[in-house]
Amino acid sequence: MNQRDERTSELFTRLAGDGTFERISIGEITEGLGDRGFGILLCLWALPNLIPIPGISTPFGLLIAMTAGQMVLGHHQPWLPRSILKRSVARSEVRRIMEQARPYIERLERYSRPRFEIMRRGLVERLLGLFVVTLGIVLALPIWGGNLLPAIAVAIIGIGLMEQDGIAVLAGCAMGVFSLIVIASIIGTALYVLVWVWHSMGMGL
């Protein structure tokens, strides 16, 4: 099968299963991406945040922001520093993440097809990159309960870019806006509680 003909779920499964070594480097993963570039990297960085693995939201959020930042700059292919490309993860962990994420990806793929190509052009693509940078920065912040929704949004946007489906990209953006509203509510509620506790303890001015 031609790499371009592979669906996203098939490509992820192949990347997780190929090879005989116990660990796989980020460089090996990116080499298997073909021409899907930004979309597949965004999806790849978002996936670990969809399952409860402590301490991963900050590095993967920064990776999302860095990758999307290159879209803002108008790059046609993503670039990663050699220090990141050399980093490796256990292949079994990659396989576990892929197996848990695959049913959701396959569900999205049933409705995805090439359409609304304007989402992948010029200024629109740069604005999209800026929005994803925002989601990546939010993911990197230590906000309790604030990882899942932005990660879902980035994953949907990534799949939309891979499948050349502008409608899926718009759906991911809508999810992203919703996630930012939810996170702003969490932060606002936390600040309100802190102020209330501060005043209830007689520490107000």
Image: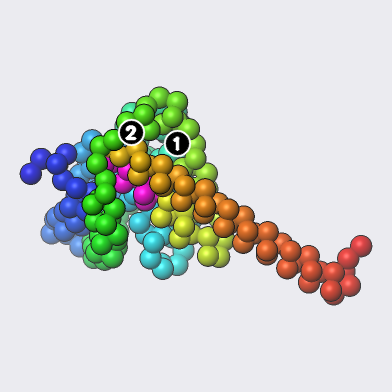
* 167 in the magenta segment: no
Q: Main secondary structure of the magenta part?
A: helix
Q: Nearer the viewer, residue 151 or 165?
A: 165
How dense is the environment of label 1, judged by Cα within 10 Å: few (below 14), some, or many (20 and up)? Answer: many
Marking on residue 128? 1
Q: Quadrant of residue 22?
A: bottom left
Q: Is residue 54 visible?
A: yes
Q: Residue at x 31, y 46 (%)?
A: 159
Q: Residue at x 45, y 26 (%)?
A: 123
How dense is the environment of label 2, judged by Cα within 10 Å: few (below 14), some, or many (20 and up)? Answer: some
Q: Which amino acid type is shown beneath numbered disc 1? A: Leu
Q: Are marks 2 and 1 in contact (CB under 8 Å)?
A: no
Task: State which quarter of the image contains the C terminus.
Answer: bottom right
Q: Residue at x 52, y 52 (%)?
A: 178
Q: Is residue 78 left or right of residue 144?
A: left
Q: Residue at x 7, y 44 (%)?
A: 1
Q: Is residue 158 left or right of residue 193?
A: left
Q: Secondary structure at mark 1?
A: helix
Q: Nearer the viewer, residue 50 or 64?
A: 50
Marking on residue 28? none
**Which residue is denoted by mark 2 in the rendering?**
116
Above or below, comparing residue 22 to residue 45 in the picture? below
Q: Which residues are magenta?
A: 154-163
Q: Earlier in the sequence, mark 2 or mark 1?
A: 2
Residue positioned most to the left: 1
Q: Which amino acid type is shown beneath numbered disc 2? A: Phe
Q: CA distance from mark 2 to mark 1?
A: 14 Å
Q: Secondary structure at mark 2?
A: loop
Where in the figure is residue 80, as x and y percent of width and height?
36, 39
Above or below, comparing residue 52 to residue 160 in the picture? below
Q: Nearer the viewer, residue 183 or 48?
A: 183
Q: Is residue 18 left or right of residue 57?
A: left
